[in-house]
């Protein structure tokens, strides 16, 4: 079994990005500037945005955190987005999800200028991805592709089973794994809450990508020998003995599944850190494109 060490690879990527930023600084060029908008004060969301801001500092990016109260109206958020769209100092920005119920997420994501949409959530960018055009690939699927590539995982002709059809992970992942090229060229089955015989389908997978958010969903009996197992689940469970009072658990019963898998991502330290590294990569790309334009 080979551990797909997202913590290590994400550090490698951050170091590579820092080299590029140092070159920009040496040439007196503007460095990438990422903004993150967070509405409300959900603990997990604040933690993630905090990690993104710290990662920016680590590689030498500028960053701005925009905090809005949970009572923010859709119009107010749309105005903030217009401001970020037109602010020339900002190269890319993200709207941290989920948003409070009074705000229509799809409407908000469509208001983001596609050239600053480093999350890759705008329909134009999603469409470009599906058509193999250059674009911002959503950070979590992008991070998974990067892990498969850096560990030289063979995906060609393999049966990839994706569990979960979310717009930010499952759906784009299913498209990316079926694209021409590598990592890709896979035969993909996208499973979800209406899938019949899901355990039977998972048992036929060479590559399993679980983005469900149900702790310990994927058991050793469900996966074939030597399967590649990617765990995108991140659920917080209370644990008084843990320093922060909670633990992060994935969808995969790691202890037992790791005995059968050929490659497997841990949680924490797998896909999560990769998500942050690829957001930085997209932001660097956004800066380079704006500098070239
Ligand atoms: N617009 C938007 N873009 C996102 O990319 C986005 C989002 N909204 N909403 C929420 C999800 C979730 N997400 C994570 C990022 C990093 C870790 C991460 O670094 N996880 C650590 C553990 C961190 C901890 O201790 O909580 C790990 O797995 O090792 C996890 C999850 C980005 N998301």
Image (spheres, rainbow, N blue to C red):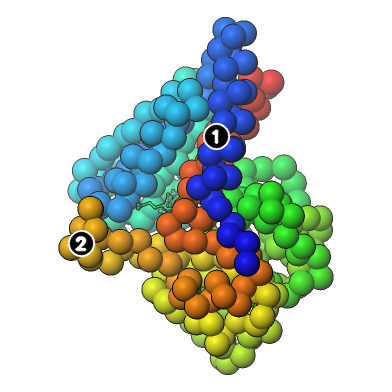
Quadrant where the C terminus sits is: top right
Work out whether 187 lies above or below 268: below
Secondary structure found at label 1: helix
Q: As drawn, is 186 to the left or to the right of 11?
A: right
Question: x, y percentage for residue 80?
Answer: 35, 34
Helix, strand or loop status at disc 2: loop
| Image quarter of the N terminus | bottom right
Q: Is residue 171 visible?
A: no
Report the residue marked by disc 2: 241
Q: Measured along the vertical axis of the image, is residue 144 above or below residue 83? A: below
- What is the crowding at mark 1: few (fewer than 14 residues within 10 Å), some, or many (at least 20)? many
Count of numbered marks: 2
Q: List the single residue furthest toward the left.
A: 240
The answer to which of 153 and 197 lies nearer the viewer is: 153
Query: At 20% across and 58% down in the image, what residue appears?
Result: 245
| Residue 39 in view, yes or no | yes
Q: Along the line of sight, which residue is nearer the eye, 110 or 256?
A: 256
In the rendered structure, the answer to whether residue 187 lies left or right of residue 138 reads right
Q: Residues within 10 Å of mark 2 (few under 14, many from 20)?
A: few
Which residue is pictured at 40% across the width and 62% down the height?
Answer: 234
Residue drawn at 38 percent across, 41 percent down = 51
Instruction: Say left or right for 225 vs 6.
Output: right
What number is the disc on residue 14? 1
Relative to 266, is 92 above or below? above
* Residue drawn at (62%, 8%) of the image: 27
Q: Position of residue 261 (x, y in %)?
A: 62, 73
Q: Earlier in the sequence, mark 1 or mark 2?
A: 1
Q: CA distance from mark 1 to mark 2?
A: 32 Å
Measuring from the top left, give residue 244's x and y in whole percent.
Answer: 23, 53
The mark closer to the camera, 1 or 2, is: 2
Residue 18, picture quadrant: top right
Left or right: 136 in relation to 100? right
């Amino acid at each position: 079994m080979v551990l797909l060490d997202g913590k290590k690879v994400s550090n490698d990527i951050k170091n590579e990005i820092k080299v590029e930023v140092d070159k920009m600084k040496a040439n007196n060029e503007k460095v990438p500037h990422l903004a993150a908008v967070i509405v409300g004060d959900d603990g997990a969301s604040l933690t993630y945005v905090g990690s993104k801001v710290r990662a920016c500092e680590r590689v030498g990016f500028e960053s701005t955190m925009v905090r809005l109260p949970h009572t923010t109206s859709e119009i107010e958020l749309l105005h903030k987005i217009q401001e970020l769209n037109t602010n020339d100092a900002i190269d890319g920005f993200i709207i941290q999800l989920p948003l409070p119920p009074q705000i229509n997420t799809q409407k908000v994501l469509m208001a983001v200028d596609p050239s600053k949409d480093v999350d890759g959530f705008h329909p134009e960018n999603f469409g470009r991805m599906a058509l193999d055009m250059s674009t911002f690939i959503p950070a979590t699927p992008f991070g998974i592709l990067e892990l498969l590539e850096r560990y030289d995982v063979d995906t060609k002709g393999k049966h990839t089973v994706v569990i979960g059809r979310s717009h930010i992970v499952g759906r784009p992942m299913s498209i990316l794994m079926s694209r021409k090229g590598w990592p890709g060229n896979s035969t993909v089955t996208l499973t979800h809450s209406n899938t019949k015989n899901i355990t039977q389908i998972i048992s036929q997978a060479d590559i399993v990508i679980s983005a469900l958010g149900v702790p310990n969903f994927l058991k050793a009996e469900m996966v074939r020998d030597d399967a590649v197992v990617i765990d995108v689940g991140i659920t917080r469970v209370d644990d008084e003995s843990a320093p922060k009072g909670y633990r992060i658990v994935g969808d995969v019963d790691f202890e037992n599944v790791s005995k059968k898998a050929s490659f497997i991502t841990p949680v924490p330290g797998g896909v999560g850190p990769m998500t942050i590294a690829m957001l930085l990569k997209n932001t660097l790309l956004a800066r380079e494109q704006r500098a070239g334009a």
